[in-house]
Structure formats: C-alpha cells, structure tokens
Amino acid sequence: GVGRAAIFLWVRSKRLTVERNVIVGCDRGIALGNPSGSTNFVEGTLHAEDSICRNNVISAGEDAAIELSWVEDVRIYNNSIYRNDADGRGIRAIQKIGVVEIANNLVRGQILIEEEGANPQIHHNVTGELDGYWTDPTSADLRLTEEATDALNGGVQLTDVTEDFAGTPRGARPDVGAWESP
C-alpha cells in the first residue's frame, strides 16, 4: 500500500526506540518518516526525532530496509540487513535529514543519502556483497560466520548499544550488525 513498511513511524513521533525486530520480505522494513508529507503537515514539523533504531534483523523486500525522511537526532545502530540485490538500498535517507548517525550496521546493499546537502555521520558500517557473512540469509538467520572478518570486532563502542539482538553484552570491540559473536 501507500506506507509500505513493516514498522512505519510518522508525523511528530518523538523519543522512539525501534529494536530487536525481525522483518522479512516487506517492501520497506522500517520507515522513520515519509517523503510525501502528511495530511496534517505544518512547515517545520518533523516525522521522527530523538529516536534510535538498533539491533534489528531485516531480510529486505523490493525497496529500502531502513528509510529516513523528515528526521532529526536519529541514530541507526547495529542493524543487520540482507538484500537479494547487493547494489540495492539497505539504508536510505531521502529528504529533510537533520542530525543523523548511522553506525555499526551490516548491510548487504548500500547506504544511500539522496538529499543534496544532507551530512549524516556515517561510520563503522560494512556494506556490499557480503557473501558468506551470514549463517542462513534465506531464512533471515543473519548471525555472523567466520568469513565476516571485517564485521567481527569491527564496530565502535556506542553508549546506546550495550547488548545485541539476543541480549548478549557487547564488549569494547563490538561486532558490526545486530548479532555479537561468542
């Protein structure tokens, strides 16, 4: 339909935490905001602010796994995203992107910033083909294998992410993605 996301947060959403979800095959996995405005749109009104999206496992559908639009002070941390199309939109920032940090995400696909002049902080992510990184991507089991060498211990410690998808504590050198390896 029109919203197209498994988790769709829109218009004046504040202080949200989206975490530990498994999303399989949805056109969009998580949408923080919407590029089409809204029926109660007021100039300057944000769709999502002061929010975090962390430790989610997304086996993406046709569009973006995580989409951002009309956001401010949003953190996208330690998500594991698998797309059949390794050139596709894993994380997509469309328009009205304020302060945003995208870190420690494992994305089979790309991180795309489509708004001219937007300057989110993007660091410690691993993107691309990532073949062999996942236990069983066809069943959305996105735990890391030994082949995920740049993801294992490849993240940065974040105060907002002290545990992984399963509640396992993250150490001083956390893994990239939703799962922390033993």
Image (cartoon, helix red, strand yellow):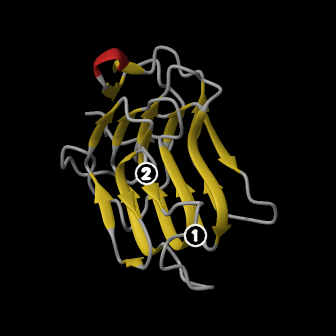
Q: Is residue 96 visible?
A: yes
Question: Given the image, on which type of amino acid does mark 2 rest?
Answer: Gly
Q: Position of residue 12 (x, y in %)?
A: 43, 79
* Residue 70 image label: 1
Q: Which quadrant would the N terminus be assigned to in this image? A: top left
In this orientation, which residue lies closer to the viewer: 120 or 43? 43
Res 3 label: 2
Q: Position of residue 32 (x, y in %)?
A: 46, 61
Q: Residue at x 54, y 22 (%)?
A: 130
Position of 127 relative to 168 (above/below): above
Q: Secondary structure at mark 1?
A: strand
> Eyeballing the image, is 64 above or below 82?
below
Coordinates of residue 141 in the picture (x, y in percent): 28, 24
Q: Residue 132 in the image: x percent, y percent?
A: 46, 14
Residue found 35% across the figure and 77% down from its top: 15
In the rendered image, the residue lying farthest to the front is 39
Residue nearest the viewer, comparing 121 with 175: 121
Spatial CA span between label 1 and label 2? 15 Å
